[in-house]
Amino acid sequence: MIESRRYVRYRQDVHEVPPESRLLNNFLWSDNEVMTISSRVAVVEDHVLVREGIERILNDSDELDVVWSGDDPVKLLHDWPAIDVILLDLELNGEVISLEVVNTFLERGARVLVVSAHNRPALIRDLVFTGVHAVVSKTESSQTMLDATLKIAHGEFWTTRELAGALVNAPPDDMAGLSAQEIRVLRLYASGLKINAVASRMEVSPHTVKGYLKRIRRKLAESGRPATTQRDLYAEARRRGILGD
């Protein structure tokens, strides 16, 4: 865990925020003086070298302060040190992040920037429609990532021509109407896990998982792609980009 405190930078000095001051749009107003206050940032990335590099880049900015860093979004939700901005890797420890986790971050008031190495237009579309504030490809420069982070720290959204193109070109029926939870079940089950293992991973009962699988098979059949066996589901998950190569 990274220890930090909320602070303001003014005339090259660091001062604690006086209680009588008021905060407006990341600026502190006090005695007719204006001081910039840093946004508190969490970095969720499973590759340590990449994570440490991101921390250095963000902490070099006077407007950003990395206060949490790790590879487990559930632990971040548990710790939750009053986060303003989250940089979230799309794939953590071999699994694509669930939309439920992203939704929870947004519901807690954080602004979310997703960092992705994947070129999956439908998934990017789903993330944007969920409400993330920016999606940055890992092929972009560190300056681009910093610019995007600062942009959303100020309450704005950030996009690129490539992202806009992904939203326009994403096939509307790519996920056959599957919910985020159904996609998660399909990803786990199609990867070869038994029903009991899927239930344990999701912290639900095997009966609930069977219900999800029944709905998944029905929706796939309605989309013209019936999948009755686990092998069939694996093929569909691969075809729709739910499972990687």
Image (spheres, rainbow, N blue to C red):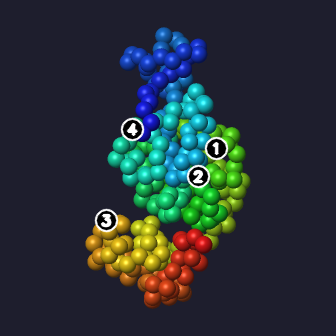
Task: Say which mark, if any, is on residue 81.
Answer: 4
What is the tally of numbered marks visible in this picture? 4
**Which is nearer the N-term, disc 2 or disc 1?**
2
In percent of the image, x 37 and y 78: which residue is there? 194
Q: CA distance from mark 3 to mark 2?
A: 27 Å
Front residue of 16 and 132 = 16
Near mark 1 (Cα within 10 A), the count class, few <14, some 14-19 or many ≥20, is: many
Tell me whether circle 1 and circle 3 mark residues in contact (CB < 8 Å): no
Tell me whether circle 3 and circle 4 mark residues in contact (CB < 8 Å): no
Q: Which residue is mark 1?
A: 145
Task: Say which mark, if any, is on residue 203.
Answer: 3
Residue type at numbered disc 1: Met
Residue 179: quadrant of the picture? bottom left
Q: Which residue is mark 2?
A: 115
Q: Is residue 126 visible?
A: yes
In percent of the image, x 68 and y 40: which residue is there? 143
